[in-house]
Image (spheres, rainbow, N blue to C red):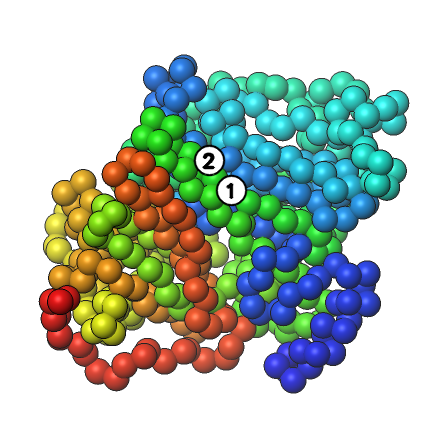
């Protein structure tokens, strides 16, 4: 239905006061109703927290509108467990930048809010509309619940954040929530435009049925992974997920938050991501390494789990067994990588080309630090095709959302970070075919 009324839908969006500029079902860098920070890293070791050193991630959330709004921030582990959420009051044209080390190490949240007596916390600029109070918020001058918080929050919660996001067992709850795939806190962030302050996670069905979630395409943002000890930093635009007009998405169609809605209703109205991507890599002068960040849509389950289990109920995420990951060199020669068997590999080596089992995945391309995670054969320069469609029980098909970014680094001097290229959209009914038919066995050397 929506494929034939796209122009009508865009006209409707423009009639809403210019709140949306992009084409629905294509991820554009335009103001949106939800922002996705698809990956973050934070060194939460005792030394790094005590001395404010080590890798960290900063992200910003900005308001493209003159009117104030609420941005609801949720921190998720790399295995899809929401652990912490908080609200940010944004005045018109506001920008808030948040350093995750402040949250993970110090237990402090950004201080924002509406004060009827003045601009003590959230300043109102010359071109901003007057501030207004929002339901569910702490709208007074006494620190308490969000968005004007009593900082720092409890040491028990700080400990839980460090344990779960680094893949350890919670000392207080006895459960696990993350993979521990790297020696840092790792996960992802969602930021939603909401109509009130709330403690609900996006994984809670009530988030979509009680008037919390908003639909104004007014948020924009970015994020930076900073490693001062090694003179590296990468910056990315956040993934901007627009909301469509009411009725644009039918019940059962893929949307960004659809897996959390009962009966696959379309109340979240967020456009989905793509399923298939292209990402570059370089393993020669001057670059000495490439990392691919891959975010994948898990099933609807979002609770912590017994540490004796392999992981969440959906773990590991699966993918096509035939050519789901293909490496191309700069002479267009294809190569299908193979993953080495081992205790850390949950799947047989002949089942997939390379394992990508979590919602957030850090993939070393070629050889980094002596460990080959994505074999590229003899190809030192080229690109990788990722078709990460997988059976999705929530929808009963294999059209799962994904996002890919890549980072290239060189000799501890400089680095670059770029989002991958979206080759399709999960709005499309049916799987996108692989670029080749049949298995590939060639692995020619580059000349």
Count all numbered tags in the image, as a single digit: 2
The foreground one among 14 and 294 is: 14
SS under mark 2: strand
The foreground one among 14 and 46 is: 14
* Quarter of the image where one finds residue 355: bottom left
Pointer 1 with pointer 2, Cβ within 8 A: yes
Q: Residue at x 36, y 43 (%)?
A: 415
Question: Is there any visible trace of residue 140 in the rendered image?
Answer: yes
The foreground one among 150 and 385 is: 385
Density class for disc 1 (Cα within 10 Å; few <14, some 14-19, many ≥20) is many
Question: Is there any visible trace of residue 209 in the rendered image?
Answer: no
Residue 290: x %, y % from top left: 28, 50
Say left or right for 319 vs 248: left
Q: Tell me how far mark 1 sits from mark 2, CA to CA.
A: 7 Å
Density class for disc 2 (Cα within 10 Å; few <14, some 14-19, many ≥20) is many
Quadrant in the picture for the C terminus = bottom left
Residue 192: x %, y % from top left: 63, 48
Q: Residue at x 54, y 73 (%)?
A: 427
- Disc marking residue 304: none
* 7 over 244 or under it: above or below: below
Residue 104: x %, y % from top left: 47, 27
Task: Decide which of tag 1 and tag 2 comes sooner along the chain.
Answer: 2
Q: Which residue position is annotated with label 2?
A: 57
Q: Residue at x 23, y 72 (%)?
A: 331
* 64 over 318 or under it: above or below: above
Quadrant in the picture for the N terminus = bottom right
Q: Which residue position is annotated with label 1?
A: 223
Residue 367: x %, y % from top left: 17, 49
* 163 over 25 or under it: above or below: above
Say left or right for 321 vs 112: left
Q: Residue at x 75, y 34 (%)?
A: 137
Say left or right for 180 vs 22: left
């Amino acid at each position: 239905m929506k494929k034939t009324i796209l122009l009508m839908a865009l006209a409707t969006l423009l009639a809403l006061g210019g709140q949306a500029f992009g084409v629905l079902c294509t991820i554009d860098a335009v103001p949106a109703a939800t922002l996705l920070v698809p990956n973050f890293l934070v060194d939460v070791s005792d030394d790094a927290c005590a001395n404010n050193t080590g890798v960290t991630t900063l992200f910003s959330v900005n308001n493209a509108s003159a009117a104030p709004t609420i941005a609801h921030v949720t921190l998720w582990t790399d295995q899809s467990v929401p652990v912490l959420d908080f609200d940010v009051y944004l005045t018109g044209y506001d920008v808030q930048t948040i350093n995750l080390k402040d949250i993970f190490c110090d237990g402090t949240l950004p201080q924002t809010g509406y004060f009827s007596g003045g601009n003590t916390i959230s300043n109102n600029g010359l071109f901003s509309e007057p501030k207004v109070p929002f339901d569910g918020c702490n709208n007074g001058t006494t620190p308490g619940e969000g968005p004007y918080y009593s900082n720092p929050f409890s040491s028990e919660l700080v400990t839980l954040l460090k344990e779960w996001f680094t893949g350890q067992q919670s000392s207080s709850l006895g459960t696990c929530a993350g993979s521990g795939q790297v020696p840092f806190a790792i996960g992802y962030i969602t930021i939603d435009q909401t109509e009130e302050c709330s403690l609900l996670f996006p994984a809670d069905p009530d988030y979509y049925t009680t008037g919390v979630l908003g639909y104004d395409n007014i948020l924009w943002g970015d994020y930076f992974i900073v490693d001062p000890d090694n003179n590296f930093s990468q910056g990315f635009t956040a993934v901007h997920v627009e909301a469509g007009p009411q009725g644009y998405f039918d019940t059962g169609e893929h949307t960004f938050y659809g897996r959390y809605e009962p009966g696959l209703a379309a109340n979240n109205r967020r456009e989905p991501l793509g399923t298939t991507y292209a990402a570059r890599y370089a393993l020669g002068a001057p670059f000495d390494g490439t990392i691919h960040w891959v975010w994948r849509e898990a099933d609807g389950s979002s609770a912590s789990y017994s540490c004796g289990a392999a992981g969440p109920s959906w773990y590991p995420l699966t993918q096509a067994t035939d050519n789901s990951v293909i490496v191309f060199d700069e002479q267009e020669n294809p190569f299908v990588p193979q993953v080495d068997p081992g205790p850390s590999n949950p799947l047989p080596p002949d089942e997939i080309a390379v394992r990508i089992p979590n919602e957030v995945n850090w993939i070393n391309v070629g050889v980094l630090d002596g460990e080959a995670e994505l074999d590229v054969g003899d190809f030192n320069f080229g690109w990788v095709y990722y078709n990460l469609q997988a059976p999705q029980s929530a929808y009963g098909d294999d059209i799962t959302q994904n996002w890919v970014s890549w980072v290239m680094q060189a000799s501890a001097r400089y680095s670059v970070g770029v989002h991958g290229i979206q080759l399709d959209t999960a709005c499309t009914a049916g799987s996108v075919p692989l670029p080749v038919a049949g298995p590939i066995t060639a692995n020619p050397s580059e000349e």
